[in-house]
Image (cartoon, rainbow, N blue to C red):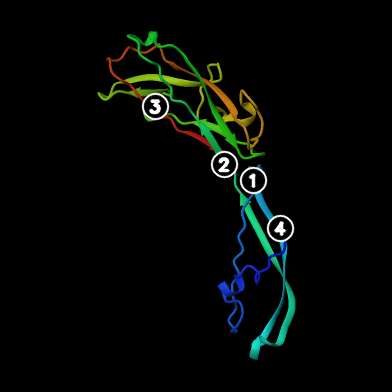
């Protein structure tokens, strides 16, 4: 693509003619919207070519006293690094209310993870803020506790934050495998209140669990 600096007034605007000080000509680049690429370093070498033909001096009556004509080229190195990243959608878990621990039903839900194309990853859930004895616990404002846990898919294997307790992208319930960059991989889970504990005093109980993705 050629651009005529003289015709578009850029020469005068940037002061490209006259003087011996090098002049900078801005070049702007942007990526294509909607591109879907894997993580890595992307490079390209572009050749910038330019030519000029102008009067080096103007005499009486606007007569050109001499012309400066020439051309040149320069290699422009362009690089861009794409890093692995994810978009995560996680709904809150609500056990609603019940008079005794046996009255809380199982909550079955899903979380959606959309990661960079070609990325292999694992998803972990930490132990929350009040873990005890290997069980997550919700806490009331009076410092009473209600033990619960989150299990993989529809099973009874606890979903945790380390080793085999994590879930791999290949273990997704929907679209298992490496990240696609578009769409989502879906991980199903079920959450239960342990029924082998004494019913704590009536109150609102809550906890906060952090989900992390590792590549």
Of callouts 1 and 4, which one flags the residue occurring earlier in the amino acid sequence? 1
Asked whether 3 or 8 is in front, the reply is 8
Question: Horizontal placement of 46 versus 131: left or right?
Answer: right
Dots 3 and 1: beta carbons under 8 Å? no
**Secondary structure of the residue carrying numbered label 1:** loop
Asked whether 47 or 144 is in front, the reply is 47
Badge 1 is on which residue? 39
Dots 4 and 2: beta carbons under 8 Å? no
Of callouts 3 and 4, which one flags the residue occurring earlier in the amino acid sequence? 4
Vertical comparison of 156 with 2: above or below: above
Picture quarter with the N terminus: bottom right
Question: Horizontal placement of 52 versus 30: left or right?
Answer: right
Question: Horizontal placement of 143 versus 153: left or right?
Answer: left
Of callouts 3 and 1, which one flags the residue occurring earlier in the amino acid sequence? 1
- Calculate the distance from the C-alpha at mark 3 to the C-alpha at mark 4: 51 Å
Dots 1 and 2: beta carbons under 8 Å? no
- At a point 29% along the width and 21% down the height, the residue shown is 144
- At a point 65% along the width and 27% down the height, the residue shown is 175
Question: Horizontal placement of 109 versus 40: left or right?
Answer: left
Residue 85, numbered label: 2
Of callouts 1 and 2, which one flags the residue occurring earlier in the amino acid sequence? 1
Badge 3 is on which residue? 131
**Secondary structure of the residue carrying numbered label 2:** loop
Provide residue 65's location: percent of width, then percent of height. Answer: 70, 89
Few, some or many C-alpha atoms within 10 Å of disc 1 (few <14, some 14-19, many ≥20)?
some
Badge 4 is on which residue? 44
Which of the two discs, 3 and 4, sits closer to the camera? 4
- Calculate the distance from the C-alpha at mark 1 to the C-alpha at mark 4: 16 Å
Asked whether 45 or 164 is in front, the reply is 45
Provide residue 83's location: percent of width, then percent of height. Answer: 60, 47
């Amino acid at each position: 693509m050629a651009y005529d600096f003289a015709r578009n007034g850029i020469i005068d605007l940037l002061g490209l003619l006259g003087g011996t000080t090098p002049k900078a000509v801005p070049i702007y680049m942007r990526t294509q919207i909607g591109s879907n690429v894997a993580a890595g370093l992307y490079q390209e070498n572009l050749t910038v070519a330019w030519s000029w033909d102008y009067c080096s001096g103007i005499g009486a009556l606007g007569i050109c006293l001499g012309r400066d004509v020439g051309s040149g080229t320069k290699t422009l190195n362009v690089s861009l690094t794409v890093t692995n990243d994810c978009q995560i959608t996680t709904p809150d878990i609500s056990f609603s209310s019940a008079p005794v621990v046996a009255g809380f039903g199982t909550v079955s839900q899903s979380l959606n993870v959309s990661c960079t194309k070609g990325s292999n990853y694992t998803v972990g859930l930490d132990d929350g803020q009040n873990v005890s004895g290997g069980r997550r616990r919700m806490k009331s404002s009076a410092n009473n506790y209600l033990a619960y846990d989150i299990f993989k898919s529809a099973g009874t294997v606890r979903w945790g934050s380390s080793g085999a307790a994590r879930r791999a992208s290949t273990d997704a319930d929907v679209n298992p495998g490496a990240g696609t960059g578009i769409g989502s991989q879906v991980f199903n889970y079920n959450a239960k209140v342990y029924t082998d504990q004494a019913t704590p005093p009536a109150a609102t109980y809550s906890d906060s669990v952090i989900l992390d993705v590792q590549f």
